[in-house]
Image: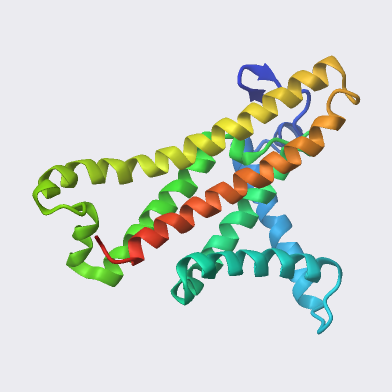
């Protein structure tokens, strides 16, 4: 039996799978693998039927990827194109995992803090690595603030601010997705169909927004690492 904030989940397919196969892997890992398989299969289907005049899945992905690419370039300039594969992957991966929680009998991997912490740490290490690669030792100026005589103080505060970023990314996504899962469980227990169906449309929007927020914050952190220190 899976649990959501202390409430028993009505049904989790992965619990049934583990009981049948005897495997001992956390549910959020299994559902994350499921989201990965969905993305891989969808990507292969789109690639196998590429057309000059897109339609169906190709058109959908071109709209999503093209829109995100334009957004990144508008904010980071042409230099930001090198980060588009990472940023688009983050958005699509989180979006797929978020939507997994809307499937009856499934749970969103992003409703588990470990999934989000892993992604947040990757983002933190990546943008710091980008900044060090571009600026070398001069990257330390990003932690010294705009005023020279305040540099010693900023060298203490800025690293704390940066360390708090992965924590913020983790808890923001976890809190929102877990909260939505708990609401769905409560509504399902009270009114299995009528109570949950209207909320699905609202949660589809909310889960999309949460994926975009993670994407946008990652982009902002990358922007800060590649721009000149003030």
Give the answer, above or below, for where 228 lies relative to 128: below
* Residue 24 in sight: no
Which quarter of the image is occupied by the C terminus?
bottom left
Residue 216 coordinates in the image, percent (x, y): 52, 53
Residue 170 coordinates in the image, percent (x, y): 48, 39
In the foreground, 33 or 112:
112
Which quarter of the image is occupied by the N terminus?
top right
Q: How is the rendered protein coloured?
A: rainbow
Q: For residue 142, what is the image quadrant? A: bottom left
In the foreground, 223 or 44:
223
Q: Report the side of 138 relative to 193 (left or right).
A: left
Residue lying at the far bottom in this picture: please name it: 52
Q: For residue 177, what is the image quadrant? A: top right
How many circles with numbers are drawn on the protein? 0
Give the answer, above or below, for where 82 lies relative to 160: below
The residue sitting at 34% across, 61% down in the picture is: 225
The residue sitting at 54% across, 61% down in the picture is: 87
The residue sitting at 19% across, 59% down in the picture is: 141
Q: Report the side of 92 relative to 157 (left or right).
A: right
Q: Report the side of 185 relative to 190 (left or right).
A: left
The residue sitting at 64% across, 36% down in the picture is: 27
Residue 184 coordinates in the image, percent (x, y): 75, 26
* Residue 204 in sight: yes
Give the answer, above or below, for where 63 lies relative to 1: below
Q: Report the side of 103 relative to 170 (left or right).
A: right
Residue lying at the far front in this picture: please name it: 147
Residue 47 coordinates in the image, percent (x, y): 75, 75
Give the answer, above or below, for where 136 lies relative to 186: below
């Amino acid at each position: 039996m899976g649990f959501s904030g202390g409430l028993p989940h009505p049904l989790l397919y992965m619990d049934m799978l583990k009981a049948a196969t005897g495997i001992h892997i956390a549910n959020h890992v299994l559902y994350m693998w499921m989201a990965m398989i969905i993305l891989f299969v969808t990507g292969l289907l789109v690639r196998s039927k590429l057309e000059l005049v897109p339609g169906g899945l190709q058109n959908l992905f071109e709209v999503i990827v093209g829109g995100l690419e334009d957004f990144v370039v508008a904010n980071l300039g042409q230099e930001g194109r090198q980060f588009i594969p990472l940023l688009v992957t983050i958005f699509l991966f989180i979006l797929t995992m978020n939507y997994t929680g809307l499937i009856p009998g499934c749970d969103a991997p992003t409703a588990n803090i470990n999934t989000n912490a892993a992604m947040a740490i990757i983002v933190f290490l990546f943008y710091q690595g980008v900044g060090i690669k571009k600026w070398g030792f001069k990257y330390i100026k990003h932690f010294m603030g705009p005023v020279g005589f305040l540099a010693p103080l900023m060298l203490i505060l800025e690293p704390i601010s940066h360390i708090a970023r992965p924590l913020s990314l983790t808890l923001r996504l976890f809190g929102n997705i877990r909260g939505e899962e708990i609401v769905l469980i409560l509504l399902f227990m009270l009114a299995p169909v009528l109570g949950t169906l209207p909320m699905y449309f609202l949660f589809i929007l909310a889960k999309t927004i949460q994926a975009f927020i993670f994407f946008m914050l990652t982009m902002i952190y990358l922007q800060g690492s590649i721009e000149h220190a003030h």
